[in-house]
Amino acid sequence: MSQAGDFKSKYGPWALVTGGSSGIGEEYARRFAELGLDVVIVARGKERLERVKGDLEKRYAVSVRALSADLRDPESIAEIEKATSDIEIGMLVSNAGYDNAGALLINDLAEENRYINLNVYAPLNLAYVFGKKMTGRGRGGIIFTSSVFGYQGVPYGACYAASKAFVRTLGEALFIEYGDKGVDVLVVSPGHIHTGAQKNMADEGWVDYSKLPRMMNVWMTPAQVVEKALTSLGRKPVVIPGVYYRVLTLSGWYLARRKDLVKIYARVMKKMLAPHLTRY
């Protein structure tokens, strides 16, 4: 059987990708379509969803459903479940998210809670809803998007780092729980990635990436991240794409004192976010 046939028989016939209209999510959707899976892409922007839908259907001759939903709203999980009730989801990629930086006390608390819905509530509930069906069938796959920021507290990015730590430890646990029932679970913890969201933040002056220390100013593409994810699925619980990021993250994790590591991140974040921390 071909690679595509093997992949589809284990993880098909449908893949569900949140954040599927751009960046890493769009690349996952493209790769799954290339491997012969039909795809459900979920995001907020209808216009971008329809663009990706049309491109995938034309290029790969697969069925694509574009579902506009805001995962910051807890009710969106029920909407997604209902919209996919007539198809078999064999692959879930919980990828929707965005960077949320700034000092906690000058950020809007309501927005922080919506952000937690997106980065904690949504991955947990999607993994429960679709994981229950996958484990019942004895096959399937779930990929979570975490971050290298999820390995320690990050001052001035506190909710982002905390939410990514939740995703990382959730996925590590489900690697065993779901794995015992035939479902592969993987957590992908990328570093800096060239995406539209990153570019928009820089263009709007929200963050100055030139202030990153040279050792942290290394960027990857969505294609590189997705390729590493798909070659790691079923083999390990967590992967950090890129040798450089693996060395940087794990050496800090094992060799530095945790409080010193947090202080390093505080200095870096202060420099990058200087214009937005003047009220703090």
Image (tube, rainbow, N blue to C red):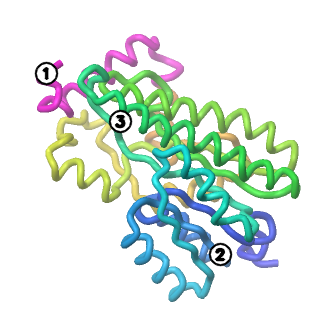
Q: CA distance from mark 3 to mark 1?
A: 18 Å
Badge 2 amino acid: Asp
Q: Are marks 3 and 1 in contact (CB under 8 Å)?
A: no
Quick check: 164 above or below 178?
above
Pick the residue in front: 111 or 145: 111
Residue 142 visible? The answer is yes
Task: Tell whether position 256 is magenta.
Answer: yes
Q: Earlier in the sequence, mark 2 or mark 1?
A: 2
Residue located beneath label 1 in the image: 279
> Quadrant of the image for the C terminus?
top left
Q: Residue at x 63, y 51 (%)?
A: 143
Quick check: 25 above or below 160?
below
Quick check: 256 above or below 236?
above
The residue segment tinted magenta is 252-280
* 273 sits to left or right of 49: left
Q: Secondary structure at mark 1?
A: loop
Q: CA distance from mark 3 to mark 2?
A: 34 Å
Disc 1 crowd, CA 10 A, few/some/many (<14, 14-19, 20+): few
Q: Identify the disc placed on residue 111.
A: 3
Residue 224 visible? The answer is no
Residue located beneath label 2 in the image: 38
